[in-house]
Structures are given as C-alpha cells and as structure tokens.
Amino acid sequence: MTGIRLTAPVPGWAIDADVVVVGSGVAGLTAALRCAAAGLDTVVVTKARLDDGSTRWAQGGIAAALGEGDTPEQHLDDTLVAGAGLCDEAAVRTLVTEGPDAVRRLITTGAHFDTTDSGDIALTREGGHHRRRIAHAGGDATGAEISRALVEAVREAALHTIENALVLDLLTDAEGRTAGVSLHVMGEGQHDGVGAVRAPSVVLATGGMGQVFSATTNPPVSTGDGVALALRAGAEVSDLEFVQFHPTVLFLGADSEGQQPLVSEAVRGEGAHLVDADGVRFMLGQHELAELAPRDIVAKGITRRMHEKGAEHMYLDARHFGAAMWEQRFPTILAACRSHGIDPVTEPIPVAPAAHYASGGVRTDLRGRTTVPGLYACGEVACTGVHGANRLASNSLLEGLVFAERIAADIAEARPPRTEPAEASRDADDLVPLLAPEARTAIQRTMTRGAGVLRSADSLATAAEGLEALHREAAADAEADGAKAVVPGVDAWEVTNLLLVSRVLVAAARDREETRGCHWREDRPDRDDAHGRRHLVVRIGPDRTPVVHRTETAAFPPVRPSD
Ligand code: SIN
C-alpha cells in the first residue's frame, strides 16, 4: 500500500473480484451493471442501503438534447456559459454527444420518464438552459425513479452487493497499482468489521461532500469519503473550491442543520418567481434569464437581497400554479413543504441557498481514469472537467451515466490481471490520526462561516486556522501514549474524512483570488481571466498538507504523463 491511510484494524476477511464499485447512485450502479454485462466479476460496496445515496434525492431531472430542434451543440453552449470559462471542452462535448443515447439506454434498463400526451419524453427548463431539455420522472422524483430502476436491474443481475459498508482506503500492489479497497462493514454477518475487497480495478462513485457544511441538500452519507480516500492514495483532486449552493432550499430556520429539503429549479422552470418580503421580483434586471439565470447568479442574487434587507431568507412564489399543477407536477416538494407547515398553493415558500453540489473532485480523464493506475472515479466524486466553475442544472445525473459507461468500457478492454495487495505498513508515520466524532459540528460551522456562499481572504484564513488546529489536536492525541487516542469507528473515520476534504477545499479557495462561478470572494469581486482560467490541482504533500498547483489552461493535462 502506498500513501497514508486511516488508523484502522488490519482487515479480518477478504474477497476477490475483477472490479469493485464503491457507491450505488446512478454512476456506481451504471458502472457495475456495464462491468458485469462485460463478464467482469463485479462487487458493489455501498455505505448504507443500495438506494440511500444522493441520486434518490435528485428532483429536477436529467439534461440531454432529446427535444425537437435541440442539439448537443446548444447543450454544450449552455454548459460552457454556466462553467464560467473553466469547463474542459472535450469533456463537455463527450457529455452532450453521448448523453441522449445514454438516457435512452437508461430507459431500456427500466427507468420511466414522464411523457407528453403524444408519448414523447416531457421536458422542462432549469437555470442556465435556453431550451426545455430536462427529462423528469414522477413529476419531481426523477432521482428516485432512476435509483429504483437501477437497483432493480442490479438485483435481477444478482450482482454481489455489500451494504452498510464504509470504504476506508485504497489497497495497492508492490508496483503501486490499485489492488482493491479496505472497508468496514456494519453487522452484515458474512462480512463483518474491517475487511478487504481485492480487485485490480476500483471505481469510486461515492457521491459528494455536502456534509462539510452545516446545512446542505445532501443526505447524511455525503461525507467526502471518496475524495479523502483518493487523496490519501496520492491521487490528484481538482476544482474543489467550486461548491455549488442551491438557490432555493426550504428555509427551516437559521439554526437548522444537516440535510434540508430542496425546492427544485424546475419550479422556477415552470414559472415560479423569486420575491422579497415586499413581493418585489429582485432577479429581474440582474440577468436576461431572471430567475432562470445560472445557479451561481441566482444564489448570489438571493444572498445579496438577504443582506440588503437584513432578511434570513427570500420567497419562491408559485401560488399561480394552483393545487392541481402542484399535486401533479411537484408532489414531493408539495408534501415536504406541507410537512413543515407551509402550503405553496396558498403562500410563498421561504427559501435560502444551501450547499448542494461539489463541482470538483478526483481528477479524471475522459475514460474516468484518475492519476493512480487502476483507480477510476465517476459521478459527483469525480472532476471530469464537465462542470468547470459551476455545474449547469441537471447535468450531474447525465455525467454519472455517460462517464460510468466509459469507465466500464475501459476496464472491459484493459481486463487487468488480479494482483496481491502489498502488506500494509503499520508505521505510525503512514497512519492518519483520527478525529473525535464530536469534532463534526466544529468542522461544519467553521466551513459554513469561512468557506460558505460568501468568502474572503480573512474568512478563509480563519477557517484554515480552525481546521489546522483540529488537525494538530488529533495528531497530538494520537501521540500522547494512546490514552487520548480516538478509538477507530465509523463516526471517527467519517469526521476524519470531513476534515481532510475541508482542508483541501479551503486551501484551493484561498489560492483562487478571484470571483468565478460558484466561488464568490467578497474581497476579489471580479473574474481574473489572466490568472484564473486554470484549474487548481491539489494533492497531499509528504508533510500531509495540501499542495496546490495550477494547470496551464482550462483544459486538463493528461492524468498519466505517458498519455
Ligand atoms: C434541482 O432540481 O433543482 C436540482 C437539480 C440539480 O441539482 O441538477
């Protein structure tokens, strides 16, 4: 094993496979199904139940040029504009050209999308799209339907799945090539406690890291485990400073923490208005698309208005939809609002931005390969270059689908032989000291205050200091003769992952001294194209601190020098 790793017991059990897929959202299950269909012995490892990841929570839909008159070229244009000069154009072109057929294959797999009276796929609009190109299911339950279809297909294909399993670290062979993962399984009988899945190809599809902030649309499992694993294994990550804050999250109070209910962009796509407490439509005049401007612009517009008015939230007014449209088109959101005492049929919905999507992640090429041989990444954990500085709404399910298929094709073609993981070093220098589970709230508050929707050099410096103090404390406790050392366990591993990804995110955000996309620096309000049209690539240095370097252009260099 190369790199550093979490303090954890030695694996007590092991199984062998050709491929291990970590994560069970649209990206993970698509990769697993395609690998299995290619005859590869495939194991799916997932942190909770198969359908507990972020995909299930996606409301709006999946963007693809499926409508009459729409073209991949127009989808490309909208994606590049939203990405604020930082998309990798080759990656976007791959997404938009392969996207429509990938959606059709998803339908063949069993996903049912809403249709028009004439039987075509019904398409809606969301922020940043100049056309109706978002396919949806169950009104506003698109992710749930995709998840249902894929989970059913995985069960039908009788894939080997291990649920309730937190992945810990990458295993590597004597040459430093991927040889599997170590993981901890919570009470599954056959595989229990810390074990290993040995495989020459590992696909990370672990989703996002929204739980680094106090309030997020992400489910509790989104603790950045895949990015943290990749960093410890020596992989490069990129664009981590670009955290997308969803503009319209149901406001449940300034102190409300954890997963918050999303109010889909599609509600604005169907004609809802953003208003302040006086009923003024404040997005008019700020952008030609008003409420349907790209997400970063709407989030900034709301935040700015909240500051001007000294308000904790704004309102989304869709009373004019009427009860029938609310019930048919947005049943999930209607139920969520009503369960919190708000009736969108008769009153405007209080909304405020909350952390939603990590546009950055583990850097990959167009085949989903990371900088570590044999390690792949797709979905939110990955940074393919598609999203640039700001993801276009509903491009993420599509990205998961398209790049998962590409990864499966690459593995099926390469068919690397199985190798033996190298003996794990027990050298204390190679072990990452664990944080006490109680540090979770401190990390989330530090990140929300210092690296949230509004950032500045000062706020980021304060956040960095707070995070480094936690890092030093954990190291000191681990060295202090074991008495104070934190006992390994799921909560401690998760919070240690949260700290690592937070430190890297803050390091990148400090380095990006401009405002671009969803990275908003109050002290640097302008975009600096001379220096900023580059990606910040980060890896963990020998002293375990984040080392940031810039790419030459907005296109990613190859992940392997030999390519
Ligand atoms: C939404 O429905 O607004 C979320 C869609 C997305 O994040 O792409």
Image (tube, grey):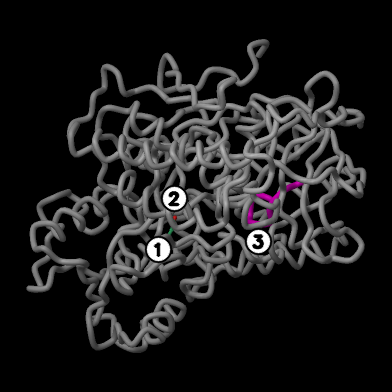
Tell me which amino acid carries mark 3: Ile
Question: SS of the residue at dot 3?
Answer: helix
Measure the alpha-carbon separation of dots 1 and 2. Answer: 38 Å
Q: Residue at position x 63%, y 65% from top?
A: 52
* Relative to 314, residue 83 above or below: above
Mark 2: amino acid: Ile
Element under label 1? Answer: strand
Residue receiving disc 1: 124
User: In the visual, does 4 lie left or right of 336?
Assistant: right
Q: Earlier in the sequence, mark 3 or mark 1?
A: 3
Magenta part of the protein: which range? Answer: 21-30
Quadrant in which the N terminus is drawn = top right
Between marks 2 and 3, how big is the CA–CA gap? 41 Å
Tell me the CA gap for discs 3 and 1. 18 Å
Tell me which label, 2 or 3, sits earlier in the chain.
3
Q: Nearer the viewer, residue 166 or 331?
A: 166
Q: Nearer the viewer, mark 1 or mark 2?
A: 2
Residue 57 shown in magenta: no
Nearest to N terminus: mark 1 or mark 2: 1
Q: Residue tagged by mark 3? A: 107
The answer to whether one can see residue 102 in this image is no
Q: Residues within 10 Å of mark 2 (few under 14, many from 20)?
A: many
Q: Amino acid at mark 1?
A: Thr
- Horizontal and vertical percent position of residue 371: 64, 24
Q: Residue at x 59, y 42 (%)?
A: 477
Q: What secondary structure is found at the residue carrying circle 2?
A: helix
Residue 504 coordinates in the image, percent (x, y): 47, 34
**Image quarter of the C terminus:** top right
Q: Which residue is mark 2?
A: 443
